[in-house]
Image (spheres, rainbow, N blue to C red):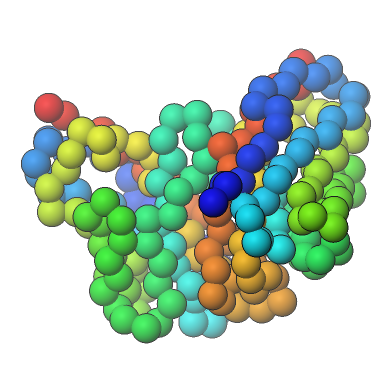
Amino acid sequence: AQSVTQLGSHVSVSEGALVLLRCNYSSSVPPYLFWYVQYPNQGLQLLLKYTSAATLVKGINGFEAEFKKSETSFHLTKPSAHMSDAAEYFCAVSSSGGYQKVTFGTGTKLQVIP
Amino acid sequence: ETGVTQSPTHLIKTRGQQVTLRCSSQSGHNTVSWYQQALGQGPQFIFQYYREEENGRGNFPPRFSGLQFPNYSSELNVNALELDDSALYLCASSLDRTGANSPLHFGNGTRLTVT
């Protein structure tokens, strides 16, 4: 069974500081890994997706994530936080098969302090 | 390009009633999935429809059912509503039923409250 664990339900950073959101995955087969962002009262927007083409994945809005198989991690980073980054972030995993079942983590709420 | 649209945005129902939620997929997308997001939780997979047939299902009882129409739009039906069904219901569409080449594109959801 596939699953993801997000460490820290709430993370606070100062504007301009590094953003680091942690995610560890468990999957019996090489996975697809994702980070999604959810703003209040909205659906989820894809930030980036790992599909084994490259271990460092660049996404939208300056975010990137590094796939580390030895650590089963897929942490999300951004060098400099912006006020508009305040939102909830979900790590997710899916495996190839007859249908796309995406399993989400419980989410990390990012607060950006001016 | 039109994104995924869901209706209604909010809905209040009474325990035991039935509800239908609607979703229009993004232009060109032939696969629709439904997810339930309880307050403070990540979304949970309900089922996926591809070419008008359910081709994958999560751990939800049969009172959760769906339809997909020839234009790829979809409905989620929930019978015999329970208080725990209160959640944000998200519809997502994609070009690819397996997800190998197309990620999910989500709508803004329908907020269902069961009293």
The residue lying furthest to the front in this view is B1
- Of residues A68 and A52, which is closer to you in this image? A52
**Residue B46, above or below A102:** above
Residue A88 in the figure: left or right of residue B40:
left
Residue A111 in the figure: left or right of residue A49:
left
Q: Residue at x 41, y 67 (%)?
A: A49
**Residue A4, above or below B82:** below
Q: Residue at x 45, y 49 (%)?
A: A45
Quarter of the image that includes the N terminus of chain A = bottom right
Work out whether residue B43 can be spotted: no
Residue A44 in the figure: left or right of residue B11:
left
Residue B13 point in image, percent of width and height = 80, 19
Work out whether residue A38 can be spotted: yes
The residue lying furthest to the left in this view is A16
Residue B5 point in image, percent of width and height = 63, 40
Quarter of the image that includes the C terminus of chain A = top left
Q: How many marks?
A: 0
- Of residues B93 and A56, which is closer to you in this image? B93
Q: Residue at x 32, y 74 (%)?
A: A67
Residue B59 point in image, percent of width and height = 75, 55
Question: Dividing the picture into quarters, in which one does residue B112 lie?
Answer: top right
**Residue B60, above or below B55:** above
Residue B77 point in image, percent of width and height = 85, 40
Q: Residue at x 30, y 70 (%)?
A: A57
Residue B88 in the figure: left or right of residue B65:
left
